[in-house]
Amino acid sequence: MNCPYKIGVGPRNYAKLQWRIFHTLGPYCRGVLLYARETMSNQNPFKPVMLHDVDRKGYEPLAEYRARGGYKALEKVLTRVAPDDVTEIVKQSGLRGRGGAGFPAGVKWSFLPKGYQGPRYLVCNADEGEPGTCKDRPIMEKHPHLLLEGMAITCYAIKAKVAYIYVRGEYYTAIEVLEKAIDEAYKAGLLGKGILGKEFDLDIYVHPGAGAYICGEETALLDSLEGKRGYPRLKPPFPAVEGLYRRPTIINNVETLASIPSIIEKGPEWFRSLGREKSSGFKIYPVSGHVKRPGNYEVPMKTTLRQLIYDHAGGIRNDRKLKAIIPGGISTQVLTPDSLDAIADFEGIAEAGSLLGSAGIIVMDETVCMVWVAMKLSRFYHHESCGQCTPCREGTAWIRKIMERMERGQGRPEEIDLLLDLCHKINARSICPLGDGATPCIISTIQHFRHEYEQHISMGRCPFRSTEAH
Amino acid sequence: MMLREQKAKAVEKILKRYPDRRSAIIPLLWLVQRTAGYVTPDGITEVAEITGVTLTQVQEIVSFYTMFHQKPVGRYLISVCDNISCSLLGAEQLVEHLEGRLGIRAGETTANGLFSLQTVECLGACNMAPVMIINETLYPNLTTEKIDQILKNCT
Ligand SMILES: Cc1cc2nc3c(=O)[nH]c(=O)nc-3n(C[C@H](O)[C@H](O)[C@H](O)COP(=O)(O)O)c2cc1C
Ligand code: SF4
Ligand code: FES
């Protein structure tokens, strides 16, 4: 049948069709529809900030970013807000670091030594390597100027004149886009000397990594940036006191910095209102694994795991049953469906028995063998341990060996407790948190799925795979 | 003498970014690898000279960071992510498929020097899993059919 309005499909025509149908309705029906639309939009007033129009082709160039109010927040602080007051606003907003540890950003900035006259640095951590995490990539690839503006505001607040973006080497597109955006910003007087005609100088440089998960750890990152192997340093001294080139340095994650312009623009109260008392604002949740719509979802931090997995990511693929959730990148404890109603913020996930970490949510359905998962992850940590500390270096190697045998069905009953013992010997006995991060996947899979370990041992093979050994 | 002759401007630009030349080691090694296809012994010597450090200090970097190759790799370097999000969606089978198609194991290069295959850790593209990178291009949402199509275009 031909379309009576001579229009085909496609979003614009669809809107036209809706409009025509709308106007054939009586005033009462129209009123009801308008009311419904109004209340629905009120319930969900939050519009993505960092993932705005994220499916666009290519990045948002400077002109477009400015046309929708970009760099207004920078202009505002340069003309009307003193540096320390910017720090105060960020403190009030309650913004917590988005790189994994959740340390309040404004508080970190205020640790810089007062009255220090020498150079100081801002380093943006764009080494995104925690498996399950893919949220910084779209910010850099699509909205590089949002990150640059956030960095400029931060540098103004902390009085840094030089900033580096340490981008992992595999992010070719992000590196290219950032370099282009930086060029645009220099040409427009938004970087360099006398920014926006004010007494504020700033240079931002991109520094590529070259493949090492450990360089995401902030002090390893600094060593790497100094042209050394990425070995984590003992703290204290903390980087805010002695960081890059032994100068005071602030290190923040991409998403943390990209949240700053909207806080300046809309105010700390607005930011706070989007979350709960101790976890304010909005953030990006990458959801991957067995969901119908894997993706990055930027939502207020009041959102529950259930909403993220079922509403945003569409629920479990092939309508299978949900078995397990890793809520914040692989260094966090595995949760079971019992925790679905936990609010996905720092406190909510901690109450459920895990950590928000990088917020990378990995969803696993009933077909997944949890011993296999733990084995895969143990390989990762063994591979990525930098080898400085004996418990981490030797412990991850042993865990991997035992896990590989366990998954093949060649484990021994006493080895389940041996694994736990090994984990406890690594925890809190290493220089950096990588060692501590290697154990939650083992401990929590044993805690929730011990019977699967036992089955592997009693059956002499992985119960989830066909009979032949693999 | 490759860098200083052929890439003088790029070298200059890199050095200007840092108060300490040593920081330029990784970016300069990238420049060597992009130009020569891998990190050549000459390249290492030159990077050491430019940054004023010892050969060992550069070699130490090359061996620590997994993206630097000390031997030539195939014209197409295929890096398949086999970490958890990708493996949940079949990355291990994709690696087997690639091994079968190319007649090599992960970590090897085909005899004609066209393809190298390796598995890598999470590429930060878990929302598009399973994924692989060929040289500098990311291929999302892979299936065996897609891989066959992509390989056909690699000649
Ligand atoms: C092994 C390891 C890897 C890490 N990887 C990253 C990373 O890729 N990106 C990141 O922002 N933070 C990472 N972190 C956290 C950083 O050390 C640091 O806490 C963070 O960059 C601080 O920024 P924020 O306060 O804005 O979150 C990692 C930490 C550890 C221990
Ligand atoms: S805990 Fe592991 S990764 Fe961290 S410094 Fe020690 S050995 Fe290196
Ligand atoms: S696990 Fe494959 S890209 Fe993250």
Image (cartoon, coloured by chain):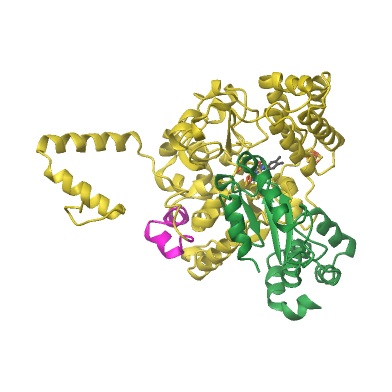
Q: Quadrant of the C terminus of chain A?
A: top right
Q: Colour of chain A?
A: yellow
Q: Nearer the viewer, residue A350 or A280?
A: A350
Most foreground residue, A75 or B9: B9
Relative to residue A310, is residue B121 drawn left or right? right
Residue shown at 52%/62% (left/top)?
A: A199
| Residue A237 percent coordinates (x, y) | 76, 42
Instruction: Verify whether residue A53 appears in magenta.
Output: no
Can see residue A246?
Answer: no
User: Residue A241's x, y, as percent?
Assistant: 71, 45
Question: Picture quarter containing residue A28?
Answer: top left
In the rendered view, tell whether residue B124 sits above or below residue B3.
Answer: above
Q: Provide the major secondary structure of the magenta segment.
A: helix
Furthest residue toward bottom: B5
Q: Nearer the viewer, residue A172 or B147?
A: B147
**Is residue A67 on the magenta stretch?**
yes
Say which chain is green. B
Residue A164 vertical placement versus A296 (above, below)? below
Residue B58 can be seen in this image: yes
- Up-down: is A122 above or below B33? above
The magenta-colored residue range is: A58-79
* Horizontal side, residue A433 vs residue A70: left or right: right
Q: Residue at x 45, y 63 (%)?
A: A62
In the orientation shown, which residue stands out farthest toward the left? A26
Query: Residue A231 appears at what percent x and percent y?
Result: 80, 47
**Residue positioned 72% across, 77% down in the render:** B7
Q: Nearer the viewer, residue A266 or A198?
A: A266
Residue A16 is left or right of residue A83, and the answer is: left
Q: Give coordinates of residue A44: x percent, y percent.
A: 35, 36
Q: Quadrant of ligand 1?
A: top right
The number of callouts visible is 0
